Amino acid sequence: MRKLIYPQLVTLDGYVGGPAGELDWHVTAPDMHAVFNALQRTYGGYAMGRKTYEVMRGWDELGRKPGDAAEYRDFHDGWVALPKLVVSSTLREVGPNASLAHGDPVAAVENLKAGEGKPIAIAGTLLAAALAAAGLIDEYILFVHPVLLGGGTRLFPDGLGRQGLRLLGTEVYPCGIVRLDYAAEQ
Amino acid sequence: MRKLVLTMFISLDGFINGPGGELIPPPFSADLAGKWIGYNLGRFDMMVYGRACYEGMVDFWTSPAAPPEEAARLAAIEKIVLSRTLDRADWGRARIMRDDIAGEFARLKQMPGKDMAVIGGGRAATSLLALGLIDEMRLLVTPMLFGGGTRLFEGGYPRTGLTLEGAEPLDNGSVLLTYRLG
């Protein structure tokens, strides 16, 4: 069995994007990017929702050119090397190293999880909520940014059900981000 | 100047109580007694509650289940209940605040005394944030997803940058996050 982990950048008030999808509160300074790059190196692949995949696809190009910033090139290299499973009922076509799952997203990810290998990282709040409700998420890795947005897309929508967690570790970065790692209690 | 400090425990998914409004307190431990309850009793001389939270606190802290020493200390602290509907609050030195919240707190901050803690109430917290009255936040993040209930951060206040003051893991699996506003 592979581990299913859910890494997310989130505000203290629990939003992953502002009312109009704003992400400008993300800290992308080189030292934070290095942390995200190192985390990506621990993945064996991605399971992604359609919207998140369409945003993240930017990394197919971003960081590809030798003149791009070193931390971008590093993330790009990790991104293109990882297999991506994209869960969507509407998408017809995906980019390099990606495959489409049209049917039941939970079943598709469960199938992926049944294999052997490094952890699968979940990307996308809708997919994550479906997987959390099905009890499939093993670990949460949250980068809590020091800001209140006051509205937007929530990391944890209502109705996921109660879930006990075990704190695995915390880390504080100079920019004020707090990393919180939790394992889901079975 | 006295500070108004949001002092609450929340689940990792941001709720201050469960789907049925039930209180789900973090597991009792040495850190919870010292770094949370003891700290709060030492630092604050005024506690601010929303109505529902106040009623829950009265139920617990006047029951036989409450630790007697802390219960006596808590009863002796001045309390404000933010409510438009409550007509009496008679648990140890409580009074009701209905109108001109911004003006009342501006005056309280100028008065001599220790800091003031907003202890409970999602709507109370949200309206105090929207009024720009909160100076600091101390949040005890408990290791659980409640999956529903009252959210601490209901939204509706302006975007606010925070300064992280500390992030301390406690012996009961919670994390104590401290932020300064403004």
Image: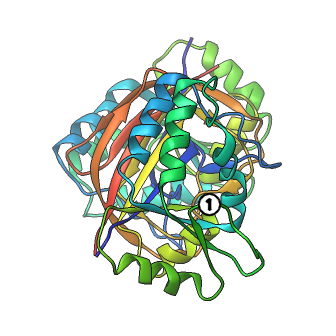
- Give coordinates of residue B57: x percent, y percent: 44, 56
Quarter of the figure that contains the N terminus of chain A: bottom left
Asked whether residue B53 is in view, the answer is yes
Say which of A136 and B123 sits in front: A136
Q: Residue at x 39, y 39 (%)?
A: A38
The answer to whether A174 is drawn above or below residue A45 in the figure is above
Say which of B60 and A57 sits in front: A57
Q: Which residue has dot 1 on it?
A: A96
Asked whether residue B47 is in view, the answer is no
Q: Residue at x 68, y 37 (%)?
A: B128
Judged left or right of residue A84, residue B99 is: right
Callout 1: chain = A
Q: Residue at x 78, y 78 (%)?
A: A90
Residue type at the position of mark 1: Pro
Say which of B4 and B60 sits in front: B4
Which residue occupies the extreme front position in the image? A66
Say which of B135 and A82 sits in front: A82
Q: Residue at x 63, y 13 (%)?
A: B110
Which residue occupies the extreme right position in the image? A20
How packed mark 1 is, by other alpha carbons closer than 10 Å (few <14, some 14-19, many 20 or more), is few
The answer to whether A14 is drawn above or below residue B106 in the figure is below
User: How many marks do you count on the picture?
Assistant: 1
Q: Secondary structure at mark 1?
A: loop
The answer to whether B179 is drawn above or below residue A183 in the figure is above
Quarter of the figure that contains the C terminus of chain A: bottom left
